Every structure is written in structure tokens, then in C-alpha cells.
Image (cartoon, rainbow, N blue to C red):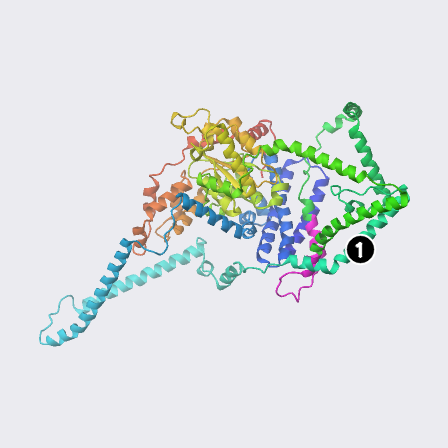
Amino acid sequence: MWADAQKDIDIQLQKEREESSRPEIDLVKVFNMLATFYIKYMQIFRNLEMAHDQLIHRQKRAAIQQVLDGVIGRILEIKKEMVQLENSEFHYIDNILEDLKLLPEDIEVPIPRYFVKENLEVLQEREKLLDQILLDTGLQVQKPDKAMTIEEAVKVIQVSERARQGRCRAAFMKKIYPQDKRERPSKLQVQTGPSPDEAATCIQKVWRGYIQRKKTEKMREEEMIFLGMTLPPHLMATSISQLHAGQGNAPRGEVQEIHEEVFKVKLKEVEGLDIMKTLQDQIGQCLIECRHIIGRFPDYPTEEAGGSMAMLSERTPEEVAAELAAKREMALLKKAPKGKIEKEGKEKTKAKTPQKSGDNKEKEGWKMAPSNFLSILEEGSSQYKAVWQNRDEEGDFLQDHDPELIKEKKREEVEEEIRVQVDKVMQQKLEELRLAVDGEKTNKQKKGRKRDMGSKKATTRKRIPEMEQDLTPDRTIDSLYRELVEEGLIIKAKTVNLSDYVGEYNYLGSLLHQADREPVPSPAHVRQLIALYGILPLGSQTVHEKAPLVKSLLLAGPAGVGKKMLVHAICTETGANLFDLSPSNIAGKYPGKNGLQMMLHMVLKVAKQLQPSVVWIGDTEKVFSKAVVKVEEEMNPKRLEKVLPKFLHALKAPDRVLLVGTTNRPFDANPKAFCKVYQKIILIPRPDYTSRFVLWKHIILQNGGIITNLLDISCLAKLSDGFTQGCMIQAVQDVLSELRLLQMTKKPLRTEEFITFLARQDPVYQEEEKTFKAWYNKTPLGKAKNRALAGSTIVLPA
């Protein structure tokens, strides 16, 4: 799988080079090309993730992970291009999937399992600490161990005693029954009931009816299989090979840790002296050659400049001398007055402006934006070809590790450590050479050090105001974490996977799009966006730093569509901490302006230190509400309105922190400030028919129900049109009580039972849906799409 994925990457890189070299005017062709790239990279992503999870060779896993991060980042870049091209977060590419003979499951975004596996011990310790703090503060009730209460113990004893008495009485009656029968042999038994012929006829009727019903059921099943309405039994049953495959996909066990430090110590002992001698000879030779060219010994580079590495970076002495001269000129320019530099800069800009011509203003067509991840993919491909492609591994049965690769990796670290020691020795030798050969003392190093110290003081002075922003310099992260948990600002995320957000793909999206009808996004589309914008960047540091940065995410939709569930799914899939800054949760906590500043500082500090982290704001429309309701005035929900932009500004690319807001009434908020805070807005609609059909089955089976022919799932999916996932879950839970589950074998489930409880829920009315659509048209992406449609631009058929 790894080899096949690498071949596909090479083919894809070749296509990328060809397409990036020429601009394209046809936007429909551009979108089809991007969608094809997206699908191909998604297939590569799935193969690499599977190979990374199944391999136990640590060095192979490291090589795959590097390429895997590059593929994920490239997918996010292509997604950004598609969004800018279509002015929509949802894309319908089922026609391209059909041309490529692929299924919608093939573009389902896989969640890399190493997000949680590699940090499993840290996450488990953090979860134990969180549970302990919640127990100490009384916010969580401890789950009872196997110890029972007095009432439960009494009930168990009573049941056991009654069972014992019943068994004793049954044994006693078994003994006295034959004796009683022997004592009364003379009594004539009076015959009651029907005659033997009538009884036999009755039994025959029942048996023939039972046999005929079985034959009819079998004929009906064969007819349904013939019509293609159901699967044959051999396809529905789980085969032995599938069971073995499932066991093979299970975790393969803990891999032995490679003691890399042992290799490092051995390398120092064996090769340390040779490395030191080689470096001294190279540096000495470079200094002598520089003196022959320049006429004197050069200044030794400082540690900040790279030390001897700057001298030995495959450059000739002439290049080293030219670089030193350029540095001196730059130092003189810095000392020169600023007015002259500004005048020269203005003259240069004036000289450049006339060169612009009107030809550049012409439309050159669409061109692929530069990528931060193609270089990573090319580097990973070359590393695979050089190290792993033609590697003979017939004797490596254990697939443990390769000592030679570890030595090569650790040899660089050993050389760096030895280089620091060599630099100190060679600086002293340089001073001695200058004194002996040229007869001059070198005070430049001391002056340079003084300047360096002065520059350090200047930098520290500049950084003092930034350091003053740390309001808790004398507190540890553990104490801040404990305080936030005790205040209820850090909560425990529910264990929910993204795959639990059940929903089917919209198979008619491209057809509706071609007919100028806007398709309704399906739960499968929502899952993809949550994975692309929330889970993948939070799980990988490389992806988060280099991919298009998404700091905030808004989930909007009617009540019950699963917004909170998706927030918990992001935390579960990435192992992120969950901070709850909902207006109802922070009411009365950290009052005043200083208290609010302290609270956000603590949240930001802990979230950055213990990343990845998710900061959740439930009912976020109240923070940006146009008018506060009198009932909520004491809660002061708008206290975060002016501080959230500063909070987001403090988040940089290396900080894996995501702000997620959820709302079921976004139209109550001020749209300008609302859309300014949230970078990505996902409107989650109610489920369509296919998603409801799959969801009914999933919920009923999950709650212990049994689906029979008496339960018409298609009818339930049709009648539940307009209801959300929350309404369906509530109806199933109301029907499948403990008593009803006990009656399941004798009394199968019927459609009418669910319809009765579903009718008690409130559906999503058309007026509410229109309100959501009208609000989304006021968002930046909605405005851009309306402008594109108004300008009679080409509507892409996806």
C-alpha cells in the first residue's frame, strides 16, 4: 500500500507541475481539475493512513507520517481553491466520482489514528487528573464500584432465598408424587376433552398452517432477492475471512522502544575523536586559505551566525570574504542617517513605477496558487526512493528498527555538540595565530561580545512589555488547569467519534446543481468539513503551521442537528481539551474588566501549553446579540464581544487552538461583528430522506431494538421529513424502554409506535429554514456567491 501510494504521489506531482505551468480561462475545467486532484489525494491519504497504522517499523512510520502530513496539507490547499472558485463550502462531485468509477465512501475523510495513539499515555494521565479534580470539587459523582447498597443487598438475598425455597419444594413434590400415585391406583380416571381423532386433526391443522406460512415467507424472500430489493444470505452473513481481517486491523501490540540515546553515547565514544580532529583540520585549512586571499585572518563567526558551520557550508574562501564584506557594508548602512535611505528608496520606487504597462491588467486566466506542501511531498518521495524502495528486507522478520539509520540521524546531533566545543578551541587558536603571524591582538571578539550583550539588553528591553502581558508569571500550568476545572471552564468531552454522526451522501447533488437548483447539504458533507477544518489541523503540528490557517469555526443550524455532538467529536478524535466559554457558563465568574482579562489569559495560556485545545462558545449569538433580553441582563452575555477579536489575534500558526461556536438562532446576532470573529461558517440543515433512512436503523439497533419486517424503516424516513436527528433519537429512546425491550421477542416493533412519540416533537418549519437561508446569504461567502450570480458568472456544475 505504501509503494502504491508513492507511485500515485509521483503521478500526481507530475500533473501538478504540468497544470501549474499554464493558466486556464475555462472555470468549469478548472473546478473539474481541482475536484479530480482532491479525489486522488484523498485516495492517497486513505492508503497512507492505513499503511502507517498497520506498520510496526518505527522508522518507516516516521517516513510515512512526513508524507502523510504533506498530503493532508495539500488537500486543505485544494479545498481552499475550490471554495474560492465556487463561493461555497459544499461541493457536489458525484458526477466525477461516477466517471472515475468510485463510491462516495472513497472520498470520506479518514481520521489518522496516530493523532490519539502517539499521545495516549499523556491523554490518559490528563483524563485521570480531570476526573480527580471533578470528584474533589463535587462536579462529578464517582461511579460506584461493585459494592452494593443495603437495599440492593437485601433484594439479592430475598431473590436467592425464594429460589432456594422453590428448589426445595420442587424436590419434595418430586418425591411424594410417585408415592401418592401408588396409594390411589383403584380410582378410575375420567376421560375429559376431545377424542384422539379430533386432537390429531387439530394438531395437523396447526402444523400444516405453520409449514405453509414458512413456505410463503421463503418464496417472498426469494422474490425480493430476485428483484434486487434485499441481499442474499451469503452476502449478509459475516464470513470467516472478514473476521480474520477485522482481527488483523486490531492494534498490533506495543512496539519496543528504541533507545536512541544508547546509540548517541556509543557514537561519541567511537567516532567523537575522529569528528573533532576532522573539524579542526577543516576550520584551520579554511582560515589559512582566507589569509592567503584577503591578506589577513578573518573574524571568527559568532554562535548566532552559526559558528564554524557558516565557514564550512560548501563555500569557497572568496565567497566567505565577499559575505563578510557585505555584512560590513550593511553595518555601515545601519549607522547611516535614515533620511538618505528613505530618499534612495523613493527614487527606486519612482524608477520602477513607469515600467508597469496595461498588459498586466488583462485577464491571464486562473493559475494554481503556490503550495507549502509540494516540497514536502517531493522530499518524501525522494527519501522513499533512496532509502526504502529497493531495500532488501528478507532477513528483517521482526521489523523492529534499523540501527544504521539511527546512527546517521544521531551522528548529526553528535557533530553539532562537538562543533560547539571545537569552536571554542579554534577561537583561541585564531587569536594565537594572529599574535604569532601578524603580531596583532584581537579585541574585536570582546567588542563583539559587548555589542552582542548590548543587543541582548536591547532585545530584552523590547520584550519587557510583552512579558508584562503574562498576568500569572509565578503560577504553574497545573495550578491554572486545576483552577479552570474547578470553575467549570474546562469540562470533560464526551467520547463521540465523527463516524457516529450518521448520514448518507447526496447522490443527486450535481444533477440538481446543473438544473439551477441548490441541493441540500447532507450529513456526509458536514462530516467532511468538520474533519478538514477542525480535526486534521488540530491533530498535526506541521499541517496546522503550513496549511491555510483556520482559527475559528461556527456551527449554525436548527436545534437537534448535532452541533454539540460535532464539538465533542473534534475533541475525541484529536485528544483536545475542551474549554466552555458559553455565556451561561461564565455568568458570575471572574467579574469586572480585570477579571475577564484574567480569565481569557488563563484560558489562552493553558490552551497553548496543553494543545490541542478547543474553546467552545455555546449559544454564541447571545455574545453578539442586537438587544439583550431582560431575563438575561444579569448574565451579561455580551461581555466577550469586544475581547474575542483580541483572543483570536493572540493565536498564531504554531498554536493548535480552535474557537468553535454553536448557535440555533444566528439571525439574532449582529452580522458584521459575528462574521468577523468566525472565519468559517457551516450551516447544518435537517437530514434528507437517505440520511433519515440510515439514521433510523442506526438509532434503533444502538438502543437495543430488533428490526423485523413489521417495522417499515422507509415509512419512518418518509414521515419524519422535517424532524432533526435529536427528535428521532428522543422518539426511539421513548419507545425502547426497559419493559419494551423485554417484550421484544414476543411483541416485535411496529412503525406506529415510533410515529406516536415522533408526533410529540417539534419539527423544523419552512419559515425557519427560509430564515436560516436568508441569514446565510448575509455572510461573506453568501454575499460573494450572490454577487457572482448577479454578475452572470458561470455557475459551475461541479
Q: What range of the chain is rendered magenta?
A: 378-407
Question: Is residue 52 depicted above or below 639 in this figure?
Answer: below
Q: Position of residue 790 (x, y in %)?
A: 58, 27
Rendering quarter of residue 401 = bottom right
- Foreground: 580 or 775? 580
Asked whether the viewer can see residue 562, the reply is: no
Q: How crowded is mark 1: few (under 14 residues within 10 Å), some or many (20 or more)?
A: few
Q: Residue at x 40, y 48 (%)?
A: 699
Q: Is mark 1 on a helix, strand or loop?
A: helix
Q: Mark 1 points at which residue?
A: 277
> The C terminus is located in which quarter?
top right
Looking at the rendered image, the quarter that the N terminus falls into is: bottom right
User: 134 or 760: which is nearer to us?
Assistant: 134
64 left or right of 412 in image: left
- The answer to whether residue 217 is left or right of residue 797 is left
Q: In this view, does 680 lie to the left or right of 320?
A: left
Identity of the residue drawn at 53% across and 52% down: 121
Amino acid type of the residue that numbered disc 1 sits on in the rendered structure: Lys
Q: Where is residue 21 in the image (x, y as percent from the top left)?
A: 73, 40
Compared to residue 540, the image places residue 514 above or below, namely above
- Give how far across and how far down residue 323 sits, in percent: 82, 39
Residue 335 lies in quadrant: top right
Image point 61% across, 44% down: which residue? 543
Q: How many labels does the image show?
A: 1
